[in-house]
Image (cartoon, rainbow, N blue to C red):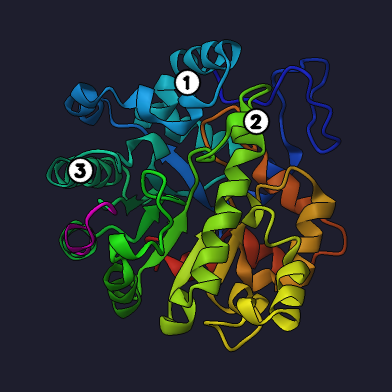
């Protein structure tokens, strides 16, 4: 199965030519293969490690994930079919490279599939699984070092082990970033019992970029139908997680943190003014932070382009600046943007300079990516 958009896609910037499942993006052809040193970099794409999945099988992970718990049977069946159809895209590097070429992506910054966080595992086992995931990412990248850059994972259920794995992933394996979830087995990232302040402090000290990616909403009893725990729940859980990082003072205490938010920055990046109003109107919203909340959105966060609409993407760019937006696809899932360059090119009145920042310049800086000579 090829990585394509849905059968009902009507995007104006897709050239379907009567074949609803397949398209040839004229923009991808035009903007790819440049010889001026620019690289198109996708920062939001996933890799599933089958060998690690076997090691984790005793945990029965599928039954413990929120996207499974809060889903009706139809959604579960569709997800099972998706994994069967897209398994090669998730795990086969040769398939991945071909899809990158078709999309016009020069480099993928590959992160683990979110259901390989394994935060629900006992701490020691969680650390062992994280190590296996990270070594698998490093091996994947080594096969195509000019095309792939790796991000790792850490066992956030134990702060000491998380710091240890962070250092190993970055300093020993050479991974360029760390992907984290939006909660730890239902606990907020700022929950005192997790003691993750030491993790965030070490991340800032090392200058490592974090990529925050959700895996469903934690209390989604009302989101079981229509794939709502992904459609609504994913951006909702990101919004809650980021709000806690801001209001609980993690960013104020660690001003050098750099965090990329998946899915266009979720809801918070587009409805930031409400939290600013609350901060100004209510003393209980000023208990920890001394600056208005949007200050931290502006200074500490980056946002991927996965908005599915040029106007929404333009609003994001206008609000935060082209230097805070990075190209993303969510490859290879069915909720992915299959024509990332086409989406960016469809943004009205976007200069070439800003387009180049978004499609690769910002990511190259965040992950220290250079074109090989």
From the image, state whether disc 2 or disc 3 is nearer to you.
2
Q: State the quadrant of the C terminus.
A: bottom left
The residue sitting at 29% across, 31% down in the picture is 49
Asked if 336 appears above or below 236 in the picture, the reply is above
User: Badge 3, how many Cα within 10 Å: few under 14, some, many 20+?
Assistant: many
From the image, state whether disc 2 or disc 1 is nearer to you.
2
Separation of disc 2 and disc 3 at Cα? 30 Å
Q: Dot 1 corresponds to which residue?
A: 86
Asked if 285 appears above or below 125 in the picture, the reply is below
Q: What element carries label 2?
A: helix
Q: Is residue 130 magenta?
A: no
Q: Is residue 46 visible?
A: yes
Q: Is residue 369 visible?
A: no
Of residues 165 and 45, which is closer to you in this image? Answer: 165
User: Badge 2, how many Cα within 10 Å: few under 14, some, many 20+?
Assistant: few
Residue 180 spot, x, y in % from top left? 39, 53
The residue sitting at 48% across, 83% down in the picture is 252
Mark 1 / mark 3, whichever is N-terminal: 1
Range drawn in magenta? 156-163
Q: Dot 2 corresponds to which residue?
A: 222
Query: In this image, 63 relative to 246: left or right?
Result: left
Asked if 130 appears above or below 372 in the picture, the reply is above
The residue sitting at 54% across, 62% down in the picture is 242
């Amino acid at each position: 199965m090829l990585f394509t958009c849905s059968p009902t896609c009507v995007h104006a910037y897709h050239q379907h030519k009567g074949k609803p499942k397949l398209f040839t993006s004229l923009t991808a052809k035009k903007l790819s293969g440049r010889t001026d040193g620019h690289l198109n970099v996708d920062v939001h794409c996933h890799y599933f490690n089958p060998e690690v999945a076997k090691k984790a099988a005793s945990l029965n992970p599928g039954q413990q994930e929120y996207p499974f718990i809060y889903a009706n049977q139809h959604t579960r069946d569709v997800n099972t079919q998706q994994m069967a159809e897209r398994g090669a895209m998730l795990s086969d590097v040769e398939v991945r490279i071909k899809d990158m070429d078709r999309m016009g992506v020069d480099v993928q910054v590959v992160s683990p599939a979110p259901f390989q966080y394994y935060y629900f595992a006992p701490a020691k086992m969680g650390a062992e699984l994280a190590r296996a995931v990270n070594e698998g990412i490093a091996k994947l990248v080594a096969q195509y070092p000019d095309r792939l850059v790796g991000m790792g994972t850490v066992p956030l259920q134990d702060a000491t082990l998380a710091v240890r794995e962070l250092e190993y992933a970055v300093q020993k394996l050479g991974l360029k970033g760390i992907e984290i979830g939006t909660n730890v087995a239902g606990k907020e990232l700022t929950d005192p019992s997790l003691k993750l302040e030491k993790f965030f402090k070490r991340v800032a000290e090392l200058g490592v970029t974090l990529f925050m990616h959700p895996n469903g909403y934690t209390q989604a009893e009302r989101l079981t139908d229509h794939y709502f725990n992904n459609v609504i729940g994913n951006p909702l859980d990101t919004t809650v997680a980021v709000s806690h990082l801001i209001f609980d003072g993690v960013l104020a205490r660690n001003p050098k943190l750099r965090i990329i938010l998946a899915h266009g920055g979720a809801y918070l990046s587009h409805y930031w003014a409400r939290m600013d109003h609350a901060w100004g109107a209510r003393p209980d919203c000023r208990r920890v932070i001394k600056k208005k909340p949007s200050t931290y959105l502006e200074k500490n966060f980056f946002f991927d382009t996965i908005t599915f609409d040029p106007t929404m993407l333009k609003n994001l760019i206008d609000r935060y600046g082209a230097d805070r937006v990075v190209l993303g696809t969510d490859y290879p899932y069915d909720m992915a943007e299959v024509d990332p360059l086409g989406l960016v090119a469809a943004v009205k009145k976007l200069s070439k300079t800003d387009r180049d920042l978004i499609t690769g310049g910002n990511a190259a800086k965040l992950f220290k990516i250079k074109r090989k000579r």
